[in-house]
Amino acid sequence: MNFLEKACLQARRRISEGYYNLDFYEAPASRPSMLEALNKPGVSLICELKLRSPAMGVIRDARNPLNLIEEMEAAGADAISIITDPDNFSGSIHYLAEASKITRLPTLMKDFIVSDVQIEAARRAGASAILLIYPAFSRGYALLGLREAIDLAHSMGLEVILESYDMEDLRASLSYDADLLGVNSRNLDTLELSLDRAYELIASLSDPDERVILESGISSASQIRRFAELGVNKFLVGTSIMASNSIALKIRELKGALRNG
């Protein structure tokens, strides 16, 4: 069983156990747009609260992870990604709900979404957007169809990042009504990381697509400049920020990549 299938099965178990039940949270009337926050000149950065990963183990030991969100915002983050998968990433749906209260930035619910229950949880937790993984739907790991999931998210006022990590899936993603297209440098079947593969995927598009976000593997300004050659200026960065001795300095380095290059 590959990692993506395992993670989707774990998500289905969490749903059955009531993990995503946020009836006691009152959904906010409105949240800032992720799309608007990222659609501007220069480097746009979604900074991710990521305490652990299956590939690296513990990345950062934080007694109060929510304090890190305030640090990211102060350093110039354009949006915040909150991983809500507790099994593989030490994430929490409650981190998302609390983060949406303390930050003015748009928040992304990053999880292995396979059900309308999770989409409703994202709305109640105050997310601006959700991440949907194309192969989770095309392979039948999810409990609903992809178009149904996107339409449901939009009906709740949520924007959608549709993620892929191979050529066929990326090209198929173009026909869906996603607000943003995530290209993951990490293969979620094997957990192999390759910025070169992600570069080739984006370069294969006949025309640059301003919806593209490069996800995973970015750790330096020079890497950002490389992808900027393809017209990419949106990046989701977790590990290198969370592992840095100074979150603020790392964010400023990445945000300034095109100014300093």
Image: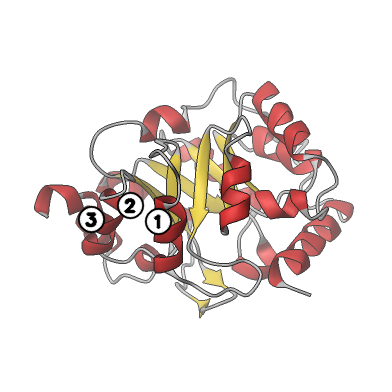
Amino acid found under the numbered disc labelled 2? Glu
- Is residue 131 in view from this perspective? no
Q: State which tag comes first along the sequence, 3 or 2.
A: 2
- In the image, residue 150 lies at what x, y percent? 69, 33
Asked whether the beta carbons under mark 3 and mark 1 sit within 8 Å of each other, the answer is no
- The one nearer the camera, 214 or 91, is 214
Q: Which mark is residue 71?
A: 2
- Relative image position of residue 44 (x, y in whole percent): 32, 42
Which of the 4 image quarters holds residue 261?
A: bottom left
Q: Which residue lies most toward the left here?
A: 260
Quadrant containing the N terminus is bottom right
- The mark found on residue 68 in the picture is 1
Residue at horizontal 77 percent and vertical 58 percent from the top: 11
Identity of the residue drawn at 57% across and 38% down = 174
Of the residues shown, which amino acid type is indicated by label 1?
Leu
Q: Give the left or right position of residue 109, taking residue 16 as reference.
A: left
Say what secondary structure mark 1 lies in.
helix
Separation of residues labelled 3 and 2 (CA atoms): 24 Å
Type of colouring: secondary structure
Q: Position of residue 196 (x, y in %)?
A: 40, 67
Report x, y in % for residue 111.
65, 53
Question: Who comes first in sequence, dot 3 or dot 1?
Answer: 1
Q: Residue at x 52, y 66 (%)?
A: 186
Say which element carries label 3. helix
Instruction: Read off the residue under disc 3.
Output: 225
Position of 104 compared to 179: left or right? left
Marks 1,2: beta carbons within 8 A: yes
Q: CA distance from mark 1 to mark 2?
A: 5 Å
